[in-house]
Amino acid sequence: MAAACASIGLTPPAAAEPARVPCGVLDQVRESLDNDINAGIGGVRIVISSPYASGAAQQRDTNVKLAMISHGVHYLEDVNGPGIVPGLAPALVDLRRASDDMRDAVGALFVVSPSYGYGLGYGNYGNYGPTVSNAWPQPSTWTAIDYADQKKDDIYALVNGFQGNCLP
């Protein structure tokens, strides 16, 4: 190409230099992926498949893990700011959508029933608050979780691609 361009008096086009991202930003992204998103997705898997937790306790623990994921996505959006890591913003949109789908699929496992009781009229005696029952995860539940996991892995791959060329 260079010889062909030189023969007609043109200079060859300069190769675009790969984007350089601050190493500290990449570290922050990786840390949130590890501590918030990966831990949250893994935690959801453990909680919904546990035969020992059920009802309200299982719902509470699942909600905590789902909140970790949501926090992680928000944190990564803040860290990325005005697009510091090329390609991260659309990857975060994909992860947010996947984690929303996962939240809906997991939330569908829990059913809250209204309170019941004997109605004896002595304060709350004999009246029980709402109860939470849950179903075993369905294939669609695991598919939604796997998809969120895949989107998380896509972000790891994106970030790892910048590691060798990051700015100190």
Image: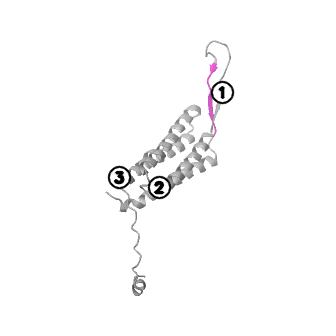
First-in-chain label (1 vs 2): 2
Q: Quadrant of residue 124?
A: top right
**As rendered, which of 160 and 22 lies closer to the eye?**
22
Q: Residue at x 37, y 61 (%)?
A: 20
Q: Is residue 62 magenta?
A: no
SS at circle 2: helix
Dot 1: element: loop
- Residue nearest the viewer, comparing 136 with 76: 76
**How far across and how far down the image is residue 44, in percent?**
53, 43
Tag 3 or tag 1, which sits nearer the N-term?
Answer: 3
What segment carries the magenta color? 127-135
Residue holding disc 2:
88
Q: Amino acid at mark 1?
A: Pro
**21 left or right of 109 in image:** left
In whole angstroms, how far apart are the C-alphas of marks 1 and 3?
50 Å
Label placed on residue 24: 3
Dot 2, how many residues are within 10 Å of its Cα: few (below 14), some (14-19), or many (20+)?
Answer: some
- Above-or-below relation of 43 to 29: above
The kind of residue on which mark 3 rests is Gly
- Name the residue carrying label 1: 114
Q: Nearer the viewer, mark 1 or mark 2?
A: 2
Q: Nearer the viewer, residue 52 or 16?
A: 16
Q: Given contact means CB atoms under 8 Å apart, are the residues at marks 3 and 2 in contact?
A: no
Q: Amino acid at mark 2?
A: Leu
State left or right for residue 141 relative to residue 149.
right
Residue depicted at x 53% and y 51%? 93
